[in-house]
Image (spheres, grey):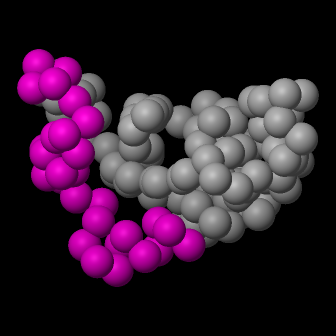
Amino acid sequence: MVAFDKLPEDVYALHKLLFEGRHYIEPPDKWGDPESVAINSFDAALDIWKEIQKQIEIGIPLTTKDLMYRLYYDFEEKDLEQLIKKYKGKHLFHFNYEDDTAWGRTMEKGDVFQNVPHEKISHH
């Protein structure tokens, strides 16, 4: 889950926000996993931008409380209430990446969202 203070105007603003000065995202396990590859940060920003646009079309970003309750199974109730307070007023989006491809491993486990408030949810 990623929280934006304001929605980026376009993919270029999103790229600047997420990856200022970085052209590539290194996978966290590149030395231990020969399938992991560095990915172009603009390609990553474009992927994220497309997902944001899809979510906006279906009525997301939701209010903080609505999104948190959609993700309820990922949090204990006391943690959920803290997160609702923490991210009140933010634009929240939920991204799902699986680690079954080199791209997915880097997007899931890399430092893609290090420059914005976020919560990493692991299902394994």
Q: Quadrant of residue 49?
A: bottom right
Q: Is residue 80 above or below residue 5?
A: above
Q: Is residue 58 above or below residue 47?
A: below
Looking at the image, residue 119 sits to the left or right of residue 75; the answer is: right
Foreground pick, 37 / 53 = 37
Q: Tell me residue 52's x, y (percent).
A: 47, 66
Looking at the image, residue 96 sits to the left or right of residue 81; the answer is: right
Residue found 70% across the figure and 56% down from its top:
101
Q: Quadrant of residue 103?
A: bottom right
Q: Quadrant of the image for the C terminus? A: top left
Q: Tell me residue 47's x, y (percent).
A: 64, 66
Residue situated furthest bottom in the rendering: 57
Dominant SS of magenta comes to helix
Would residue 13 be seen by someone viewing this image from the given angle? no
* Number of numbered tags placed on the structure image: 0
Looking at the image, residue 100 sits to the left or right of residue 70; the answer is: right
Q: Quadrant of residue 80?
A: top left
Q: Tell me residue 5's x, y (percent).
A: 41, 43
Q: Which residues are magenta?
A: 50-79
Would residue 74 be seen by someone viewing this image from the given angle? yes
Q: Tell me residue 86's x, y (percent).
A: 26, 26
